Amino acid sequence: MKRLLGLLVVFLPWPLKRAVLRRFWGYQIADGARIGLSYVFPGQLVMGEGAYIGHFNVAIHLGRLECGAHSVIDRSNWITGHPPAGAHFKHRSDRDPTFSLGQHAAVTKQHIIDCTDRVDIGAFTTIAGYHSQLITHGINVLENRQDCKPIRIGAYCLVGTRVTVLGGAALPDRSMLGAGSVLNKSHVESYAVYAGSPAVPVKKLDPEAAYFHRERGFVH
């Protein structure tokens, strides 16, 4: 019944939809935030001023979705996870099925983001291009059970098209992940291009590059 009600809410005019989501779901949505024709029903939703979720996105089975001020989830993205009270991952007592998108950060189009464990996207970061996958869970063959680890993408990063980021991986602030790369561990060196499978630092970046110092997320 609640799923059917959610489908009906999707098609309401935005001012009415916002009021319903605030009143009946308890979501915290700033007056200047907006959701398009998308099925967005996490356990908790927080959207800052100017945050935007476009059309044809799905965000379900999340404990929490946080969209910082002026952040963007553009179109046709699938953001899901495993709810806190789910049947699996009982050994991960600290598991946090949250997707957190920093202020002025952007997720472009047709990406898959698995938030079985927490996924953090830093402020002013762009998940660019199409068809990237951020996957926090998988099968631990030694222990024969599902397992998960969080993912962190730092601030002012640029993530190229069609990448794969696995649980436990981290991309440092002010760095780039090259198109088609596989990021499978935590890195610490900023101002670097990471590329390959698995991704390793392959090039230094100029700390004075304008992308790393912009005050608006949108790139003309």
Image: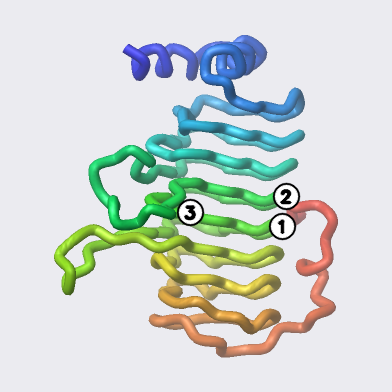
Q: Secondary structure at mark 2?
A: loop
Which of the two discs, 1 and 2, labels the residue nearer the N terminus?
2
- Tell me which amino acid carries mark 1: Phe
Res 118 label: 3
Mark 2 crowd level (few <14, some 14–19, many ≥20, 10 Å Cα): many
The picture quadrant where one finds residue 48 is: top right
Residue 87 seen from this side: yes
Residue identified by numbered label 1:
124
Q: CA distance from mark 3 to mark 2?
A: 19 Å
**Vertical placement of residue 44 versus 92, above or below:** above
Res 82 label: none
Q: How many marks?
A: 3
Mark 1 crowd level (few <14, some 14–19, many ≥20, 10 Å Cα): many
Residue 142 image offset from top left, x and y in percent: 17, 74
Q: Secondary structure at mark 3?
A: loop
Is 116 positioned to the left or the right of 143 in the image? right
Which of the two discs, 3 and 1, labels the residue nearer the N terminus?
3
Q: Residue at x 82, y 69 (%)?
A: 210
